[in-house]
């Protein structure tokens, strides 16, 4: 049997923060005088903070200086923080804690591989920061998903080869990053949207109990 490790995305896999990102980006769009919809928000999943702002400004057909962009990013994050600092363990998505328990039980190590610079804060808020062997987040990378950098750093933290790493992701950019890293990609969410993933589940609750055992024999 081969050794395996797991790399978890955070937003949309362990917690549902997309709704808070939406409210914070919408407030900025409102201030700038254009409509930002939930469909627009879908485009920002897995995308870095700066890239998200660029997509948003494109939607509003707004051109601003680099200085203004910096100010908008600070304003948006301040609003976002007002929501995430109120998060509790109740917001951990169904199946996530059970999955961490299964991995602990099987002796499979796991790290976080998130684009978010707020990842440590969110994990502390919901009380699971200390469960991860390492946290790789938006502060540790220079290239955003779909670049594989975040997951390749994760593999190093796990002391494993990329092909021994299983990535749980809810965003297309994240699945692409996992595939670009030559890892086993698992799409959590809409199978049609995440059709490039090696495996698909609607949520973490659906992962069969023998999923990791089977992968170990295949690998
Ligand atoms: C990702 C989210 O996890 O983190 C994106 O899916 C978000 O929507 C990105 O833009 C960056 O997050 P933060 O917390 O650094 O603004
Ligand atoms: Mg995500």
Image (cartoon, rainbow, N blue to C red):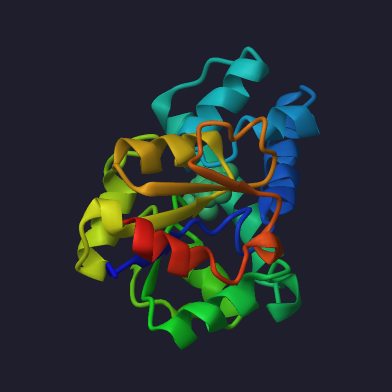
In the rendered view, tell whether residue 57 sits above or below residue 68. Answer: above
| Residue displayed at 54% across by 32% down | 53
Marks counted in the figure total: 0
From the viewer's perspective, is 108 left or right of 51?
left
From the viewer's perspective, is 68 left or right of 7?
right
Question: Residue 180 appears at what percent x and percent y?
Answer: 32, 36
Looking at the image, which is closer to me, 154 or 44?
154
Q: Where does the N terminus fall, quadrant-wise?
A: bottom left
In the rendered view, tell whether residue 50 sits above or below residue 8. Answer: above
In the rendered view, tell whether residue 138 sits above or below residue 129. Answer: above
| Residue displayed at 66% across by 65% down | 84
Q: From this viewpoint, is residue 69 visible?
A: yes
Q: From this viewpoint, is residue 75 visible?
A: no
Question: Residue 166 appears at what percent x and percent y?
Answer: 40, 57
The answer to which image quadrant residue 181 occupies is: top left
Question: Residue 163 appears at what percent x and percent y?
Answer: 27, 51
Looking at the image, which is closer to me, 70 or 81?
81
Q: Residue placed farthest to the top in the image? A: 61
The answer to which image quadrant residue 136 occupies is: bottom left
In the rendered view, tell whether residue 182 sits above or below residue 108. Answer: above
């Amino acid at each position: 049997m081969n050794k395996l490790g797991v790399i978890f995305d955070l937003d949309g896999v362990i917690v549902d923060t997309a709704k808070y990102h939406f409210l914070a980006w919408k407030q900025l769009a409102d201030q700038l005088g254009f409509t930002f919809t939930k469909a627009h928000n879908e485009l920002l999943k897995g995308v870095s903070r700066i890239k998200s702002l660029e997509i948003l400004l494109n939607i509003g057909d707004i051109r601003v200086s680099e200085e203004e962009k910096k100010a908008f990013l600070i304003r948006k994050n301040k609003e976002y923080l007002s929501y995430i600092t109120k998060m509790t363990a109740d917001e951990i998505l169904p199946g996530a804690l059970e999955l961490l328990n299964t991995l602990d039980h099987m002796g499979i190590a796991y790290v976080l591989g998130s684009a978010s610079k707020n990842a440590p804060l969110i994990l502390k808020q919901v009380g699971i920061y200390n469960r991860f062997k390492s946290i790789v987040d938006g502060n540790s990378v220079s290239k955003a998903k779909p670049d594989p950098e975040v997951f390749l750093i994760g593999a190093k933290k796990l002391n494993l080869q990329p092909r021994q790493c299983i990535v749980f992701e809810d965003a297309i950019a994240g699945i692409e990053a996992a595939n670009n890293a030559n890892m086993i990609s698992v799409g959590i969410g809409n199978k049609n949207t995440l059709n490039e993933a090696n495996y698909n589940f609607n949520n973490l609750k659906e992962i069969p109990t023998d999923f990791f055992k089977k992968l170990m024999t295949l690998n």
